[in-house]
Image (cartoon, rainbow, N blue to C red):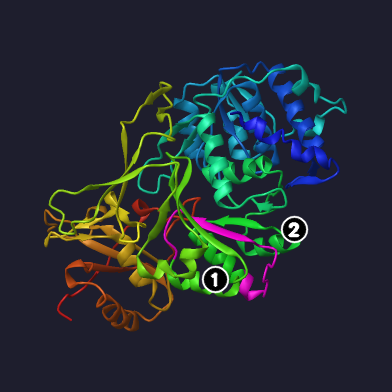
Amino acid sequence: MKLISMFLNRQYENNLSKKILIGKKGNYKYEEIKNNISFLIHILRKKGIKKGETVITILDNDEYGIFFILAASFIGIQIILPYNLREITLKEAKFIYNNAKYDHIINFTTKEKHLKYLNSPLFSGKVIHLYDVFQNKHLYKYNDIFDNNTFTDSIKNFVVLFTSGSTGAPKGISISEDLICLRIKNVTNQLQFNNSSRIYMSGLLNNTTGFIYSFGAFLHGAILILPREKNIDNWPFEVDLYNATHIMLRPVYLQKFINSSINHNLKLKSLQVIAYGASSVPEEILNRGRKFFNHCDWVQGYGLSESFGPFCWMKEKEHKEEIYNKYIYCLGYVDSTMEVKIEPLKGEKDSNVGDIMIRNFNMMEGYYDITTKKIQKIGEWFITGDLGYFSSEGYLVLKGRKANTVLNSNGHRIYPEEIEKIYRKIEGVMQAVLLAASNSTDLENESEFDQAIICIYGSFNNNFFIKEMYQKLKSISVEKWPDYLYFSSSPFIINDNGKIIKHKIKPNNLFKISNEI
């Protein structure tokens, strides 16, 4: 299946006067979008872009990015999308520009630091600037491009995305156009998209949420709404203004969205589905949000960049039963698009916990080496890097990232999510993250086993906090307590998806947690 075919939707032809895209630069009818895509196809071909070429693409998170991705699908080119699209950090971009094998760089951003770098002699003849291309668009209609050309076949290595890099360097992953279309169809069906939906696209165009929400809206003949600004505190006002029915939020953004809505008493009665994922959401946030937005369904999705989106779901039924209060991180049921098994860990004291593995179908093409364009294939079973188990009810329950767990001298595995959840319940805590001592240079006489450091940022009295901490820790066995406590005077750095970047934390002046209290 082709991504462009999701947009060329006959449902829109029944009402050609309807604005189906509320963008940052304007609002668009179906024919206007078609004309913009057609015009862009014309320009790209005129610039020498051909089927089969590889293009590094620097997009702003707006409708021009959507037009370009659809044009790329039509022409049949491979696009490499740097990870940090919203900020487009120059450091990361330089690495890709300087090391990747590619035919062109297509730039839609006007950020001065990137323009200065891209206009250097290093990239002479390689860069095509298109940030002002639509300002020069002629009145001539280019829609006949769709009539006079047949589509290329679906592209095997259509998009190269990058993992978040929250646990290290981002990895390039190659995604086929067929997988993108399959995931868009499955996920949007799970989220109940239909032709009366109004989709608020809170994701980024270089990750799965952005693709699924943007092109999923077109698949179902819905209206797509792009946020006008990055400030999440203002998103409830936009949802209210445009009567959005669906929104997906990462945990950090969900908390901000709920707080802003409550503070401004915006009930957002148009909302039908609030979806979230990427990491666990503290139960107090979910309880607060569900109490305020009690008119809509709540859906949690679990997936990977490598699977291009979620395949495991906790829906409204499970939310009503408050399953999220029963487990540290319940992922819900695995859907029919994926096969999951638990591979037991040797020597693990918790015998039902193991590696979460997924069968290699409906998965990425493989890890993409930007320096050689070679793809590292995966085996029959893909090791997700997550540890978990199946509950007696059949739920997949996540214990945590294997690489982030701490194996202490007692042979017990300490799971960050479990510890962080306990600490987030203490009044005043804004951020909590567990590290292994190997990330710190401040500990003397490190043993062969890991030392667990719980890092906290918030607003509280330290003595009060420590007293509360010991009370909360009684809920788990003493063998799984952290070894040290670190109070940070400033917020921890987060990446574009709201995840704390652990390797940026440098703990010092540590407080030793006694297990004899």
The first of marks 1 and 2 along the sequence is 2
Q: Give percent across and percent down for residue 217.
A: 66, 45
Relative depth, front residue between 190 and 49? 190
Q: Is residue 231 left or right of residue 310?
A: right
Residue 52 visible, this orientation: yes
Q: Give percent across and percent down for residue 228.
A: 70, 53
Is 350 placed above or below 128 here? Answer: below
> Which residue in the structure is indicated by mark 1?
290
| Location of residue 30 (image quadrant) | top right
Residue 26 visible, this orientation: no
Q: Residue furthest right?
A: 139
Name the residue rendered at 49%, 69% in the picture.
Answer: 320
Name the residue rendered at 66%, 31% in the picture.
Answer: 5
Identify which amino acid the numbered label 2 is placed on: Tyr
Q: Is residue 271 magenta?
A: yes
Identify which amino acid the numbered label 1 is placed on: Arg
Label pair 1/2, CB-CB below 8 angstroms: no
Q: Of helix, strand and loop, which mostly describes the magenta segment?
A: loop
> Which residue in the structure is indicated by mark 2?
242
Q: Give percent across and percent down for residue 289.
A: 55, 70
Q: Give percent across and percent down for residue 397.
A: 34, 58
Q: Is residue 116 left or right of residue 508?
A: right
Q: Is residue 243 left or right of residue 253?
A: right
Q: Secondary structure at mark 1?
A: helix
**Which image quarter is the C terminus in?**
bottom left
Q: Is residue 302 magenta?
A: no
How far apart marks 1 and 2 lie (CA) works out to 22 Å
Is 7 placed above or below 512 here? Answer: above
Q: What segment is highlighted magenta in the picture? A: 261-281
Q: How many marks?
A: 2
Q: Secondary structure at mark 2?
A: helix
Name the residue rendered at 14%, 56% in the picture.
Answer: 449
